[in-house]
Image (spheres, helix red, strand yellow):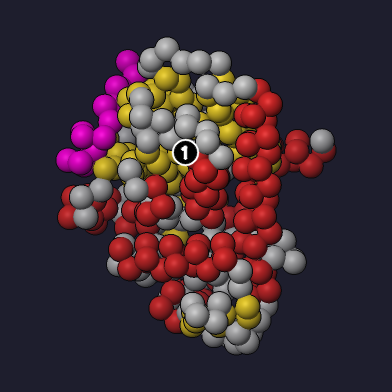
């Protein structure tokens, strides 16, 4: 119980960007909701239209899957595959299926975003050290040196042998993709178990599986009080609704606020956008995109979502809301009064 309280406190103080709350806009059958701490945040599974015992059994299997994925992908667990890779210093290591799948997803999103999503950003992230109240920025020389350790294309991934090799001193972090990848896999498991109507929420990365309408609350990134809504999205499932932003995880250095999402091309915290949410029908391709969008900054992000035909809602540093052309076909945004 103490561990759960610590994880929950960490979640409340600095995990997700948009806090997504949801209700169906049509009459629903009885639902059963199950909650567990996973990946340093709170995951929930809500199941509709089946008996409680069946719902509980399916949810338990979904959570077991999530914990298994975490054991492979977490950089905070000394025994995880990722932690072993980050300690490998140029030696190839064997990886399992979820690690390989998540790595492939990360590389694909890196290619899609032109390198703005890059899982090798970890040395830069550590240099900015936003978790420990840094008193100064890393020097320009430090950033320049660390940028040489960044670049997902330097990862040697042998898919046939299921091995990965990182050059010495390089490190990766699946923080921008792991939660989204996990909720996708949990939703797939529920579907295979015969659960036709469910919501899987991993710290704000959300999958809705039924073909019906849901109302999703979007948190105001400028509000002093958590839970204040910027507006609501009316979204028809099945869909993935994934979010990223910098307003809850940040540091203040010399009175200037720096968000935790790093631009891997400059080595500095991203600026221009407070938050981004995307909606995708092909849910397996969704994880990582929103984080890459934040790293781009506003102007480049607007061009990107239009050129790539992505349903996106962006909120800039001034509070202006931008919705891509495709977004209108996926959801209706109802702004709070």
- Residue 51 x %, y %: 62, 22
* In-front residue for pair 336/79: 79
Q: Percent from the top left, x then y, of residue 7?
A: 70, 42
Placement of 51 over or under 290, stated as above or below: above
Q: Quadrant of the N terminus?
A: top right
Magenta segment boundaries in residue numbering: 323-337
Q: Residues within 10 Å of mark 1 (few under 14, many from 20)?
A: many
Instruction: Report the front residue among 39 and 219.
Output: 39
Above or below for 167 versus 188: below
Q: Is residue 66 visible?
A: yes
Res. 3 image quadrant: top right
**Residue ID at (45%, 81%):** 154
Q: Is residue 332 magenta?
A: yes
Give residue 292's quadrant in the image.
bottom left
Q: Quadrant of residue 5?
A: top right
Mark 1 highlights which residue?
206
Residue 9 highlighted magenta (yes or no): no
In which quadrant of the rendered image does the C terminus lie? top left
- Residue appearing at x 36%, y 29% in the figure: 211
Relative to 261, residue 101 above or below: below
How many dots with numbers? 1
Q: Is residue 183 visible?
A: no
Instruction: Judge left or right: residue 105 versus residue 10.
Output: left
Residue at position x 61%, y 26% in the image: 33
Direction from residue 137 to residue 74 in the image, left or right: right
Determine the residue located farthest toward the top in the rendered image: 27
Q: Indicate the position of residue 71 as horizontal and vertical percent values.
A: 68, 59
Residue sitting at the far right: 2
Name which residue lies at 65% across and 23% down.
52
């Amino acid at each position: 119980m103490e561990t759960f309280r610590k994880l929950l406190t960490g979640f409340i103080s600095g995990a997700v960007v948009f806090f997504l709350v949801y209700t169906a806009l049509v009459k629903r059958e009885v639902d059963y909701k199950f909650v567990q701490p996973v990946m340093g945040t709170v995951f929930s599974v809500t199941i509709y239209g089946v008996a409680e015992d069946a719902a509980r059994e399916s949810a338990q299997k979904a959570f077991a899957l999530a914990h298994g994925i975490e054991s492979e992908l977490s950089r905070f667990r000394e025994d995880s595959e990722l932690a072993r890779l980050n300690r490998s210093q140029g030696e190839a290591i064997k990886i399992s299926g979820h690690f390989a799948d998540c790595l492939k997803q990360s590389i694909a999103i890196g290619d899609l975003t032109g390198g703005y999503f890059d899982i090798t950003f970890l040395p830069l992230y550590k240099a900015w050290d936003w978790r420990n109240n840094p008193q100064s920025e890393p020097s320009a020389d430090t950033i320049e040196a660390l940028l040489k350790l960044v670049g997902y294309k330097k990862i040697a991934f042998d898919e046939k042998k299921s091995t990965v090799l990182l050059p010495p001193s390089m490190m990766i972090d699946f923080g921008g993709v792991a939660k989204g990848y996990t909720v996708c896999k949990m939703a797939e498991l529920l579907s295979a178990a015969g659960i036709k109507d469910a919501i899987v929420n991993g710290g704000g990365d959300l999958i809705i599986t039924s073909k019906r309408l849901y109302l999703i609350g979007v948190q105001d990134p400028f509000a002093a009080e958590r839970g204040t809504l910027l507006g609501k999205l009316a979204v028809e499932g099945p869909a993935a609704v994934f979010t990223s932003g910098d307003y809850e995880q940040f540091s203040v250095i010399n009175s200037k606020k720096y968000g935790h999402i790093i631009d891997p091309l400059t080595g500095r915290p991203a600026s221009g956008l407070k938050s981004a949410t995307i909606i995708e029908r092909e849910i397996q391709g969704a994880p990582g995109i929103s984080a890459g969008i934040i790293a781009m900054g506003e102007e480049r992000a607007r061009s990107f979502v239009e050129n790539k035909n992505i349903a996106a809602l962006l909120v800039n540093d001034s509070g202006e809301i931008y919705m891509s052309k495709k977004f209108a076909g996926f959801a209706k945004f109802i702004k709070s009064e």
